[in-house]
Amino acid sequence: MKKRLIIFMALLAGLLLLFYFVFSKGEFVMESSSYLDKDAPDNVDQSFYLGYGLHWEGFGEPVLSRVTVIKNDGTELDEEDGEMTVFAMIDEMGRTGIIDEEAAKNEGYDDHYLPVEAYKVDENFLLVFRAELHDANYENNISHLLIEYKKFGFQQKQLLEFEGFFREFHQDKTAQN
């Protein structure tokens, strides 16, 4: 009787370890990114759509719950932030790089944007952010994306390094001559 109990417990522990291994493996990898020139004068109070190519490496097909932009201090960038506002979507056509909102609407890009919530990830997908800068003196204070998703019904999270939406692009004046 004790021998059967020991074998049963060992099998149960093995199944639990296998279950944990299968369900905890996998990660999102950023394959491409887009940035706006922070110093361009027409960037303030204008909305842009920026695309970021992501790839799921792992077992199963996760279902996205939420994508959140995380600031350097560890807090979420939310709608109350006065410097900029951001909204995440999925581009089902996979064609958004950088485009201003007016052009996106005129060319029908926004007709193919889906909500992040409940999006079932196949392998590759294009995460799009609608970003609007409200403060010309904005200093990049973004460090990560928090991707929340479900895999086999279990809620999981991944913190992905992220450099933000704006960069300073310095032109080499000697190259222009």
Image (cartoon, grey):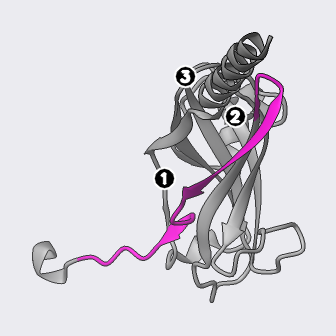
Image: magenta residue range: 150-171
The disc placed on residue 69 is: none
Q: Nearer the viewer, mark 3 or mark 2?
A: 3
Using residue 150 as the reference point, say whether residue 59 is left or right of it: left
- Left or right: 1, with 157 as reference point: right
Q: Position of residue 171 (x, y in %)?
A: 27, 76
For disc 3, the neighbor class at 10 Å (few under 14, some 14 to 19, many from 20) is: some
N-terminal of the pair, mark 3 or mark 2, is 2
Closer to us: 143 or 139:
143
- Please tell me the numbered disc located at residue 123: 3
What's the CA distance linking mark 1 and mark 2? Answer: 15 Å
Q: Is residue 58 left or right of residue 20?
A: left
- Secondary structure at badge 1 equals loop
Q: Amino acid at mark 2?
A: Ile
Q: CA distance from mark 3 to mark 2?
A: 13 Å
Residue sitting at x 58%, y 29%? 125
Q: Work out whether mark 1 precedes mark 3 in sequence or the reverse, and give the earlier one.
A: 1
* Residue 66 percent location from the top left of the image: 80, 45
Compared to residue 80, the image places residue 25 above or below, namely above
Residue 90 disc label: 2
49 relative position to 175: left or right:
right
Q: Is residue 156 magenta?
A: yes
Q: Which residue is mark 1?
A: 34
- Tell which of 120 and 157 is nearer to you: 157
**Residue 170 placement (x, y as % from top left):** 31, 78
Asked whether residue 124 is in view, the answer is yes
Residue at left 69%, top 59%? Answer: 131
Alpha carbon separation for disc pair 1 and 3: 20 Å
The three-letter code of the residue at mark 1 reads Ser
x then y, percent, for residue 32: 43, 44
Element type where label 3 sits in the image: loop
Vertical side of 12 occupied by 177: above or below: below
